[in-house]
Amino acid sequence: MKLLKIVPDDTNIKFLKLRIPFFVLSIVLIFGSWAAVLVNGLNFGVDFAGGQEVRMTFTEREQAPVASLRELVGRLGYGEPVVQEFGGPQSVSIRVPLPEGAEDTPGAATAIGEKVIAAIAKQYPDVRTDGNDTVSGKVAGEFRDQAILALLAAMAAVSIYIWVRFEWQFGVGAMFALVHDVSVTIGLFAITQMEFSLQIVAAILAIIGYSLNDTIVVYDRIRENLKKFRKMPMSELLDLSVNETLSRTVMTSLTLFVALIPLLVFGPPSLFGMVAAITVGLFIGTYSSIYMAGPLLIWMGVTSNSFVPTESAIERQEKVARGEA
């Protein structure tokens, strides 16, 4: 059975030996990612940039052909459409980007919606049009701001949770690791100019959850070892903790990666950005749990005695009375 193990039980990899070079690399990645966002910007999708929304219902079908509609509308040349079920399995919402200036030109946006309706009605005679509306850039911008606030709130909640469960130093380490993971993911979209939509926000939230899970596993083992090895140097204790959880980390990451490969290679184009974000987050989340969340504990002065309860004056008096001091 041991031959089947990908990671042996007795690994002794000196991860923390390279903590300073990797920490510098992480700082460079964070600043480089936000520099790319400032220089290139993000290629916002219809969710965040506005566009034309058409709502339709297929009266003679049990379920709307979402995949076929996405391909059909995409061939019209208005960019990548967002096609989702809306209110029920028979109804869909179809949103397409608007060409520059179309929103300010009277009738231009509505005409685009009518072309989408005509193309769908030609192929699906049973379809009924329920709406043809323009989603303004202002409304989409407010939606974008709310999504950013949701990400920040999730990161803050995660850090507070770890702070309460462990100590404040652990909360700071987790927050820094999450900032690193989110920054690198957003930087990837700024550099590649892949469409940044609500799906990507969902992917980033998934990355936050995965990174948190991995960090908590490492932190739990660190806390256990802090109680067991009081005289062990902190860097050695962190290496020991990471090595003890390495098998679990590798198997979790590998299992998820194997599931993502078919979606990356054979999945529809509409899901590529989301899957790519989760794939990148899978690796950087594992990396940050080892080289960001852990080493920060050393630099914040955590030692094996940091969380040992101090003896109160009353306890000392009771010991003196019992003759134990």
Image (cartoon, rainbow, N blue to C red):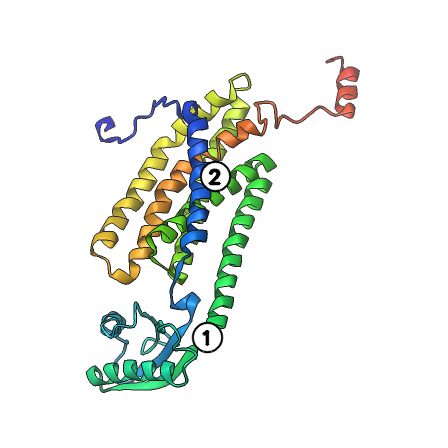
Left of 196 or right of it: where is 303? right
Element marked by disc 1: loop
Residue 267 location (% of width, % of height): 23, 58
Front residue of this view, candidates 229 and 117: 117
Residue 120 location (% of width, % of height): 25, 81
Q: Is residue 167 visible?
A: no
Q: Are marks 1 and 2 in contact (CB under 8 Å)?
A: no
Q: Residue 47, located in which quarter of the rendered image?
A: bottom left
Q: Residue 10, located in which quarter of the rendered image?
A: top left
- The residue pinned by badge 1 equals 136
Q: Is residue 288 above or below residue 69?
A: above
Per the model, the C-alpha gap separating discs 1 and 2 is: 42 Å
Residue 186 location (% of width, % of height): 41, 51
Left of 163 or right of it: where is 196? left
The amino acid type, in three-letter code, at marker 2 is Ile
Of mark 1 and mark 2, the one earlier in the sequence is: 1
Q: The N terminus appears in which quarter of the rendering?
A: top left
Left of 165 or right of it: where is 260? left
The dot on residue 216 is: 2
Residue that appears at 40% across and 26% down: 15
**Circle 2 Cα neighbour tier, 10 Å, few/some/many (<14 / 14–19 / ≥20):** some
Q: The C terminus appears in which quarter of the rendering?
A: top right
Residue that appears at 34% across and 41% down: 252
Residue 70 location (% of width, % of height): 26, 71
Residue that appears at 33% across and 81% down: 113
**Circle 1 Cα neighbour tier, 10 Å, few/some/many (<14 / 14–19 / ≥20):** some
Residue that appears at 79% across and 17% down: 321
Element marked by disc 2: helix
Q: Is residue 222 above or below residue 30?
A: above
Q: Is residue 125 above or below residue 71?
A: below
Please tell me whether mark 1 or mark 2 is closer to you in this view.
Answer: 1
The amino acid type, in three-letter code, at marker 1 is Ser
